[in-house]
């Protein structure tokens, strides 16, 4: 690692290599309790929990799992939005030696059934409104017990009284689950279980902490096996990168869902490691987020481009003070330069682009928050993280500026895919580099650039076109709020470029005007030949635009025409 170009860009405050504590993830919660028991750990819609309450509640949950017969290595599914219960269940499962399986509350029955069967989860923790969905698939899975909680369980008075009526109006029904047989109530566990420390031997290097399922853009989702080493290493890297932030003095707003690895690491794990407060929101709503920042003054805001765009384009943005925010690392999708500049103007803080994968716990690269930043770059590798660009196919190293596949090594890299040895082998080179599937290049200063996913590259008339480059140009147009570019079949060119556009409120632009604009800023072969205007774009729960969904829609249209 001594010869890595990017080290020359490191400020003296960030070491090139870290000394890692060889402890399980839950150790950081134990330490936060021992050192700052009365410090606020969680703020949730007006309710606050101290580190003492979080620690003791997690132990109660872990001890209860042991009474259910859970053994070390068993999988526990958590199907909750950002909430105290989600954090308690996460750490409680780890105290019990279990492996957490983060499960998206928006999953359909089919998606839920697949993940539960694939992971072999024995217990699931879910919201009351999700109980009917869980029960419909339970017989097909290895589930033995269901633990049910409700959003109201951790709301302050009088919100806890009012919320059930709001919930019934929103979802159309109310669920009443009794604590009997395989059904267990979260709040009964908190009343009856003991907060006794659990003695459990852990292998830091080998023991799994998490099965984090990939998005499944191609084929079925795969369970990424992340060890205690992977997660502790990545969160300690994150702490080192945020060297100006002080332990015990920051607050981190948790809008990114914890069932996504990015939100889990940069909010939940980082908060506990640094003994800071996490401000949890169960879902992203632009106005609620603006009000929360204005009132509670969070200093850190990990997010995704669509979250920042949603705030910037809210008509009441000017009414709220966002200047408490010191730093934001944007992930999950490319950060348009125009969005970065506007958000920094609104907050007076720093917003930088980072990069990572589920397979890397997730962060591997980021721009320096307080140092040199390079436009459109994902930045430089984090401490102890090695990266390079190789030629697709034979993995020969590429020269500066040449596009190839980004490959990575580091302590945050997964051990493999759950029960998929062949796919695991195909994802690593013979000498142990993780193949990311992303196309990019490195400049002579060690800064990396991702031009697109390998599978998303458009080949039109023999030219390689990277959607991100076209999207960057479109984002600079004053009328465009969001956009995504894909390749669609073309009889002459093989593929041609199509742009999906969401306009800012009150703005108008025609396809002809966009065509003129793009021709001034792009080579002719990169200019979109088709534009489609939409009210919104399909997204994941963390705001990542689902390019593959749009590609599939276009293929379906073509098939129907040909039929």
Image (tube, helix red, strand yellow):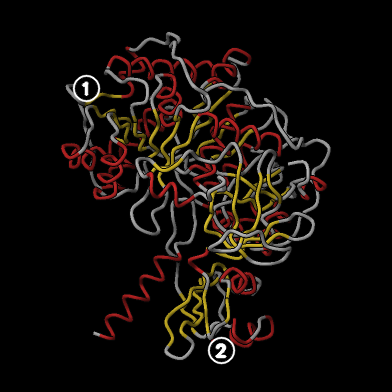
Q: Is residue 314 visible?
A: no
Quadrant position of the N terminus in the picture: top right
Q: Which residue is at a point 69% across and 85% down the rendered structure image?
A: 520
Q: Residues within 10 Å of mark 2 (few under 14, many from 20)?
A: few
Is residue 517 at least partly visible in the picture?
Answer: yes
Q: Are marks 1 and 2 in contact (CB under 8 Å)?
A: no
The residue located at (68%, 81%) in the rendering is: 521
> Based on the displayed image, in which of its 4 quarters is residue 34 positioned?
top right
Q: Residue 347, relative to residue 531: is it above or below? A: above
**In the rendered view of the protein, which quadrant contains the C terminus?**
bottom left
Q: Is residue 241 above or below residue 286?
A: above
Residue in the foreground of this view, choosing between 407 and 181: 407
First of labels 1, 2 by sequence position: 1
Residue 323 pos. (x, y %): 71, 45
Q: Residue at x 66, y 55 (%)?
A: 378
In the image, residue 117 lies at what x, y percent?
A: 26, 40
Query: Is 506 on the left or on the right of 201, as rendered?
Result: right
Callout 1: SS: loop
Point out residue 469 in the picture as x, y percentages from the top left corner: 62, 71
Residue 105 is tagged as none
**Real-space Cα separation, disc 1 to disc 2, in angstroms:** 63 Å
The secondary structure type at the circle numbered 2 is helix
Q: Which residue is mark 2?
A: 512
Q: Nearer the viewer, residue 257 or 197?
A: 197
In the image, 521: left or right of 54?
right
**Residue 179's mark?**
1
- Residue 343 falls in which quadrant of the image? bottom right
Residue 472 x %, y %: 63, 69
Q: Is 430 rendered above or below residue 305?
A: above
Question: Residue visible at 41% across and 70% down?
Answer: 550
Packing grade of label 1 (10 A; few <14, some 14-19, many >=20) is some
């Amino acid at each position: 690692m001594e010869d890595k170009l990017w080290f020359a860009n490191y400020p003296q405050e960030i070491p090139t290599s870290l000394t890692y504590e060889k402890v399980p993830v839950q150790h950081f919660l134990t330490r936060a309790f021992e050192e700052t028991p009365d410090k606020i750990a969680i703020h949730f819609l007006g309710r606050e929990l101290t580190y003492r309450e979080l620690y003791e509640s997690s132990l109660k949950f872990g001890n209860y799992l042991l009474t259910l017969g859970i053994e070390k290595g068993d999988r526990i599914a958590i199907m909750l939005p950002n909430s105290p219960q989600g954090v308690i269940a996460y750490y409680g499962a780890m105290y019990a030696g279990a492996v957490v399986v983060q499960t998206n509350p928006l999953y359909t029955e089919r998606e839920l059934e697949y993940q539960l069967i694939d992971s072999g989860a024995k217990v699931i923790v879910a919201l009351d409104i999700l109980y009917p969905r869980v029960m419909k698939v339970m017989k097909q899975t290895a589930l033995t017990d269901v633990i049910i909680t409700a959003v109201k369980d951790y709301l302050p008075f009088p919100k806890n009284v009012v919320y059930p009526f709001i919930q019934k109006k929103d979802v159309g029904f109310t669920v009443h689950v009794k604590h009997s047989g395989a059904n267990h109530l979260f709040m009964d566990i908190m009343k009856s279980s003991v907060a006794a420390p659990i003695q459990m031997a852990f292998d830091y290097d080998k023991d799994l902490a998490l099965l984090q399922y990939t998005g499944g853009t191609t084929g079925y989702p795969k369970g990424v096996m992340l060890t205690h080493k992977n997660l502790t290493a990545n969160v300690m890297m994150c702490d080192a990168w945020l060297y100006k932030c002080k332990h015990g003095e920051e607050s981190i707003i948790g809008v990114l869902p914890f069932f996504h690895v990015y939100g889990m690491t940069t909010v939940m794990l980082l908060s506990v490691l640094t003994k800071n407060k996490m401000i949890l929101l169960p879902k992203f709503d632009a106005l609620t987020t603006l009000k929360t920042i204005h009132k509670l003054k969070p200093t850190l805001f990990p997010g995704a481009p669509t979250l920042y765009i949603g705030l910037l384009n809210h008509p009441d943005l000017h009414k709220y003070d966002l200047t408490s925010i010191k730093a934001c690392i944007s992930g999950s999708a490319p950060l348009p330069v125009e969005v970065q500049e506007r958000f920094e103007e609104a907050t007076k803080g720093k917003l930088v682009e980072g990069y990572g994968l589920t397979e890397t716990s997730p962060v591997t690269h980021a721009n320096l928050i307080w140092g040199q930043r390079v436009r459109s770059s994902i930045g430089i590798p984090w401490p102890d993280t090695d990266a390079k660009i190789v030629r697709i196919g034979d993995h020969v190293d590429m020269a500066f500026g040449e596009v190839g596949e980004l490959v990575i090594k580091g302590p945050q890299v997964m051990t493999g895919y759950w029960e998929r040895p062949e796919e695991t082998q195909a994802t690593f080179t013979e000498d142990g580099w993780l193949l990311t599937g992303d196309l990019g290049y490195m400049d002579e200063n060690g800064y990396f650039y991702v031009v697109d996913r390998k599978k998303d590259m458009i080949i039109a008339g023999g030219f390689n076109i990277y959607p991100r480059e076209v999207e960057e140009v479109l984002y600079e147009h004053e009328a465009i709020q969001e956009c995504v570019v894909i390749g669609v079949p073309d009889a002459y060119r093989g593929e041609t470029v199509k742009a999906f556009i969401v306009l800012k409120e009150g703005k108008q632009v025609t396809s002809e005007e966009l065509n003129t604009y793009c021709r001034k800023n792009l080579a002719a072969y990169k200019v979109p030949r088709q534009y489609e205007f939409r009210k919104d774009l399909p997204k994941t729960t963390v705001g990542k635009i689902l390019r593959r969904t749009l590609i599939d829609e276009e293929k379906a249209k073509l098939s129907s025409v040909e039929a």
